[in-house]
Image (cartoon, rainbow, N blue to C red):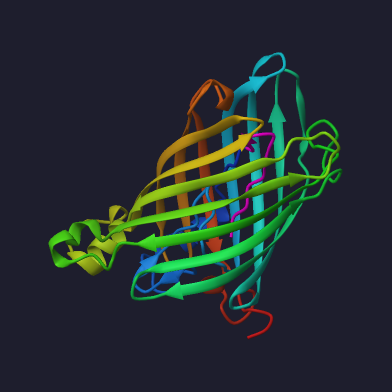
Amino acid sequence: MHTSSRRGGKPLLTAAIIAASTSSLLLIPSLASAHAIAGDRVFPATMAVDDPGVGDEANLVYGHQRVPGDNGDQSINTFDFEYDKLITPRLAVSVEGSYAMQNNPTARGFDNFGVGLKYLLYVNEAHEFMTSVGISAELGGTGSRAIADNFSTISPTIFAGKGMGDLPDSLAYLRPIAITGEAGPALTTGAGQPNAFNYGFTFQYSLPYLQQHVRDIGLPQPLANIIPVVEVPLSRSQGQTTGTVNPGFIWINRYGQFGVEAQIPMNRASGSHVGILVQAHIFFDDVAPTTLGKPLFQ
């Protein structure tokens, strides 16, 4: 579960730190037990639009982007972290935070901290379909005054993912395609503060799926474990839609993943330059399935 608050119609920057301590976990190619699975489909933990699965996991993200500010463009660097814990095999809780550094005006500090709850509703193995519901809250006043708002934002959200593995043999090379999406309102508690409606989708082509379930075309490592992806996170508030188009890739194995995406603003209100997201992600439910990654209740 990866959550990303978006206030006032402007998507909050998500982003990814690469932890050197995880690199040894990202060398084993097996995808056998990754956490968001529907049939033969593995849905990766995408960076800007949350995947439809639940799991014991940690997400680290670094991001850089230039966005419109009150005094002209401002450069923002963010360091985001999230930890998700399974309560049951279908129910997970999350805690998250973000440290931001910006100029024009110069400010740095923690944004408001957040908590979340996500429940896996339904999985159809044969049709590679998965859907879940969740709610997250960014807690006003818990971050730095220079960065964070003094009001809270509550976001109920629905998530879904569909793989194309049920296509006929004549379309076999389209079977690695998957589409995921999310949608839900962002409701603020501050008087006079605008609400928003956040939504988005991803388009993925899984090379591991191609190799393992369509045809082994002999791709070497690390190409055999790469999933090219395009994410489109969007938000609408006060009649204005903002968002980015994020082309990139995710390298995934059984124990975690590494990803890089560009952030291309879709309009002037969304930003003035291309940004970047870099992600490192650990699946604790596969790294330590009997201890740290075990659900509290079976």
User: Can residue 11 be found in the magenta stretch?
Assistant: yes
Left or right: 90 in relation to 204: right
Residue 217 visible here = no
Which image quarter: residue 127? bottom left
Q: Which residues are magenta?
A: 1-12
User: Can residue 288 be found in the magenta stretch?
Assistant: no
Point out the residue furthest to the left here. 170
What is the x, y in percent for residue 143? 82, 42
Point out the residue furthest to the top here. 71
Left or right: 247 in relation to 91: left
In the rendered view, tell whether residue 249 sits above or below residue 180.
Answer: above
Quarter of the figure with the C terminus: bottom right
Left or right: 73 in relation to 257: right
- Towards the viewer: 164 or 89: 164
What is the x, y in percent for residue 167? 23, 65
Point out the residue furthest to the front here. 239
Which image quarter: residue 230? top left
What is the x, y in percent for residue 8? 69, 34
